[in-house]
Amino acid sequence: MTSGNLPPYDVEAEKAVLGSMLIDSEGIFKIATFLAPEDFFNPENQFVYEACFNLYERNEGINQITVARELAQKGRLDEVGGAAYLSHLVSTVPTSLHIEYYAKIVSRLAVMRRLISAGSQITALGYDTDVQDDVALGRAEDILFKVKQRRSRQDFVPIHQILGQYFEEAGPVETRGEEIPHILTDFSAVDDFLGGLQRSDLIVLAARPSVGKTSLALNIIRNTAAKQKACVALFSLEMSRQAVVQRLLSNEANVDSRSVRLGTYTEREERRIMEASGVLSELPIFIDDSPLLKVVEMRSKARRLHFERKIDLVVIDYLQLIEGGTRSDSRVQEVSEITRSLKALARDINAPVLAVSQLSRAVEFRASHRPQLSDLRESGSIEQDADVVVFIYREEMHVKEEDWKKDHDIEVEPYPRGIADIIIAKHRNGPTGEVKLRFVSKTAKFEDLESELSAT
């Protein structure tokens, strides 16, 4: 809708969005990831949505009373028209079922207004003859990029859809009925030690680069989805969803990951890859590869998928790439906010949250390179908020075989090629210690290894 020379807007759609949220507070789960307060044209509606969003971020209920109180605390209740305006908003919609439809109208018209604004800025650049043409073009591109960046929001995509794009075919996702009591990694030594991944726990999986933390996380995702039909949500902040799928295909088909990535596999391997595609297509795995996600957006997306599908496991790769909700001069404070929010998410959806994390360089400068809790980057809050902290350590990455032979009897202690120590450094409800797994570098895959459990 437009009025005179005003930019495009639809005040009735704005009211419908707000009324829907006041009727059903869970409606915000469906729209919080793509609709921001500044998307509303009407200032009063913008203030009301901002109040709703603030309540949502604090995990408080959204209704006429709480929204009125939030507006009053900000000194804006009278400005929007008082409690009477909130009652009017509720009266504009009979049901909250169509909140997404109205929200998309509001979002689309906000994009059009930004495009008009961008056009005016670019026009002004064109009239500025003192600016070099290449500089002007660069600034124009930046202006349009900002509009596009705000518009393009990724969301969860089921793995069968990604595989469908990869092979131009897709299969249905199988649904599951009853709740799984705890999530098994399908690594017997790890599951025996931890009793599986417990619901509402925050588990941190940490290692130095190239040790295999992402590979182990992907192995766990595949195993629990295949063996338990667990619904898994993966936030892949570093790798694209295509790269994730290529890794999973390599593991499932037992084909060199480099061959899968470059397409240099043999005819026989291609058949195995196609078979693996069929298996993976059936798994309830959902992948969101949005970069630079804020923790509040992550929480919104996870809660919305949980509302639709009931999530059994959330995996985040990796923790240090998450943006906090508020700007802070201290990254440690920002990470504290992030880990608290992840723990709250685990409790909120009653599912384990497995967060992959980087270790600091300090581990490289010690005589013993075995990681410890203080090696967690911005470690204080991570160590405090996590229920379980797991490290991966591979001796072969620090000691060459010829050096090993000098200090060990290889008949008694053979060189640990392909052996990964899985160190449980913190276990809030159980013992700490370590188990061993085998790491197959060709396919970046972990496998069970017969080993003794060493608990402390």
Image (cartoon, helix red, strand yellow):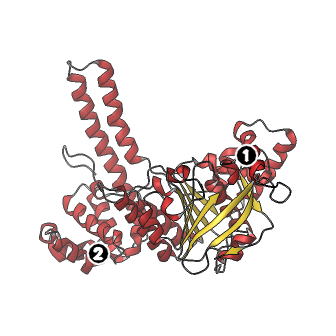
SS under mark 1: helix
Q: Quadrant of residue 221?
A: bottom right
Q: Is residue 365 left or right of residue 12?
A: right
Q: Is residue 107 visible?
A: yes
Q: In this rendering, is residue 272 above or below 431?
A: above
Identified by mark 1, the residue type is Asp
Identified by mark 2, the residue type is Val
Q: Is residue 259 left or right of residue 63?
A: right
Q: Which mark is residue 90?
A: 2
Q: In this rendering, is residue 215 above or below 268?
A: below
**Residue at the image position 30 percent from the left and 23 percent from the top:** 135
**Residue at the image position 36 percent from the left and 31 percent from the top:** 141
Horizontal and vertical percent for residue 447?
76, 60
**Residue at the image position 45 percent from the left and 61 percent from the top:** 298
SS under mark 2: helix
Q: Quadrant of residue 314?
A: bottom right
Q: Which residue is mark 1?
A: 403
Real-space CA distance between mark 2 and mark 1, rounded to the nearest whole angstrom: 74 Å
Q: Residues within 10 Å of mark 2 (few under 14, many from 20)?
A: many
Of residue 441 and residue 268, the one placed in the foreground of this image is 441
